[in-house]
Image (spheres, rainbow, N blue to C red):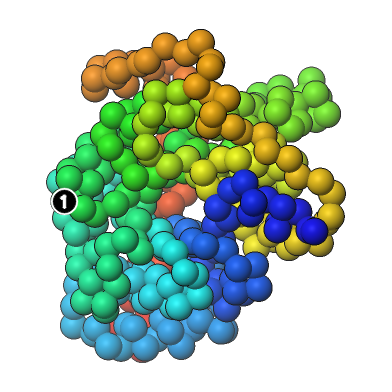
Amino acid sequence: MNQLDQLKAFTTVVADTGNFKQMAQFAPRDATTNPSLILKAVQQPDYAPLLADTVRAHRGQALDQIVDEVLVRFGLEILKVVPGRVSTEVDARLSFDTAATVARAQRLMALYEAAGIGRDRVLIKIAATWEGIQAARILEQQGIHCNLTLLFSFCQAVACGEAGVQLISPFVGRIYDWYKKQAGAAWDEAASAGVNDPGVKSVTQIFNYYKKFGIPTEVMGASFRNVGQIVALAGSDLLTISPELLAQLQSSEAPVARALDAAAAQDLPLHAVSLNEAGFRYALNEDAMATEKLAEGIRAFAVDAGKLDVLIQQQLAA
């Protein structure tokens, strides 16, 4: 049995891509997208007509409305391939505006519902800033489920759990990148692999905490750099994996064992944590890696959102 099939015995596998034509071969349950993945997809010849058709159909609407129509159009195509949920991201430029995030999320969900898709099949992706987490709290109370992304620290996970968020996406690879860069020539790849990988350790801590205290928020490890990181998190509620790494898992028959265990977490000597806004901001500030990576991630998504705007404006002008 290949590694991908073994992994599916412990963990729900999610495809991390906007390329829905490539997705079916891996039979993921869910799929996640972000501005960078959608930008990458619409620049491919296969998807150019989808962008052009959507822009043409909504000519005359505001640019941000057309962007949301494009995002949802991709989501609808993805939902033809996966049996579960698709994650669609709110514009990263709204990451520090709770009210604007709520409004944009409501509009995305309304577009899905108008196309006949129920709320159980969509997760609205929001950056795990304090403002984003509070937006998710409001949305969850309205029955709009959220996926909190760009999550690098324990304090972000605690706040998401307290807000009743449906799912979080703690990033593994970007944490690994930061520590590797910090260490420079002193980095020891072998000593920092598997369960000792700093990104793997972060997700493991969050998973164990949630399971220990019965927090129902789903944990979906994200942003992987290698198969070793994925295998070290077998047993996480979900793992979202790029097509390249899904292909590697599918082509290997090396053994995969459960690494994370909800039952075993019950016996761990952990203490419950509660964070108000001041406590959250201070804890995040104390974590240099998380502070830098959250800011960097929002900037990068904002740049790609801007590039998508330009592509759409070019279509409108054509």
Decide if residue 177 is on the left or right side of residue 12: right
User: What residue is drawn where x is 23% and y is 46%?
Assistant: 140
Label 1: few (<14), some or many (≥20) within 10 Å?
A: few
Q: Is residue 134 above or below residue 75?
A: above
In the rendered image, residue 70, in percent from the top left (x then y), is placed at: 35, 74
Q: Quadrant of residue 213?
A: top left
Decide if residue 232 is on the left or right side of residue 18: right
Q: Quadrant of residue 295?
A: top left
User: What residue is drawn where x is 61% and y is 33%?
Assistant: 260
Q: Is residue 143 above or below residue 21?
A: above
Decide if residue 177 is on the left or right side of residue 302: right
In the rendered image, residue 251, in percent from the top left (x then y), is placed at: 81, 62
In the rendered image, residue 37, in percent from the top left (x then y), is placed at: 51, 62
Residue type at mark 1? Gln
Which quarter of the rendering shows the C terminus? bottom left
Instruction: Return the residue nearer the eye: 43 or 265.
Output: 265
Q: Quadrant of residue 174?
A: top right
User: What residue is drawn where x is 56% and y is 84%?
Assistant: 46
Please indicate, yes or no, whether residue 86 appears anywhere in the rendered image.
Answer: yes
Mark 1 lies on residue? 142
In the rendered image, residue 21, in percent from the top left (x then y), is placed at: 57, 78
Instruction: Return the residue nearer the eye: 117 or 35.
Output: 117
User: What residue is drawn where x is 35% and y is 64%?
Assistant: 121
Decide if residue 135 is on the left or right side of residue 228: left
Which quarter of the rendering shows the N terminus? bottom right
Determine the secondary structure under disc 1.
loop
